[in-house]
Amino acid sequence: MTYNWQLATGQQLSVDNQGAQTVVTISNNSAGQQQRTTNSFNTGIWIVPPEMSILHERGFANDPTGATVKITTPTGTVLIQVRGNSIQIQSAHSGEHQSSTSTSSTFTTGMAPIQPMQPMQMGNMQMNMQPMVMKMGDMELNMDATASQSKFCSQCGTPVKPADKFCASCGHKLGS
């Protein structure tokens, strides 16, 4: 499961647990520019969701300078520090930096994954996302796999049924 945090305008931090590996990605998006930095660390399997604390320079509360991500595993706690495009392990496993646990009250849990979109209805219009179906009155647009199998005559473009061997409009022999 991937957890995401917004660090600063245009900067996002993503943390994912892939087995015993923790993958940390920083994405920077600004006008006409995109940068992405990814590091992977052997932290062990998470036992709780990761927590993140934003770092600020003294006197600059509205200007984040980085973040610390707290990963808790069966063998202890790992702190990963993010500054700019740099991703580094600050401390690894239990007991190495006891003072780092005193800031745990400032940590926040990442955003949970987005749930699938529920069907929408407005008046006589309906829309479902899985599979994509839109209905308005007696008209229906179906974008699922079976709808994409609709057939048309390659000669004149008239819709034909899957069982048709010849086009009813122009008589062209249809392929299978």
Image: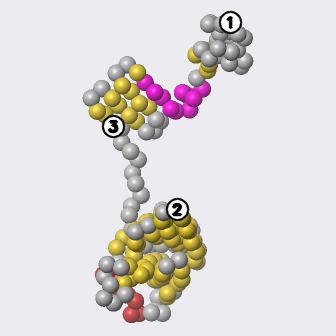
**Taking 173 as reference, is 11 left or right?**
left
Q: Secondary structure at mark 1?
A: loop
Residue beneath disc 2: 32
Above or below, 136 relative to 87: above
Residue in the image at 44% along x and 67% along y: 10
Q: Position of residue 73 (x, y in %)?
A: 48, 77
Under mark 3, the amino acid is Met
The disc placed on residue 171 is 1
Q: Position of residue 162 (x, y in %)?
A: 62, 17
Q: Is residue 162 visible?
A: no
| Bounds of the magenta segment | 140-149
Quarter assignment of residue 36: bottom right
> N-terminal of the two: label 3 or label 2?
2
Residue beneath disc 3: 120
Q: Position of residue 43 (x, y in %)?
A: 54, 78
Quarter assignment of residue 86: bottom right
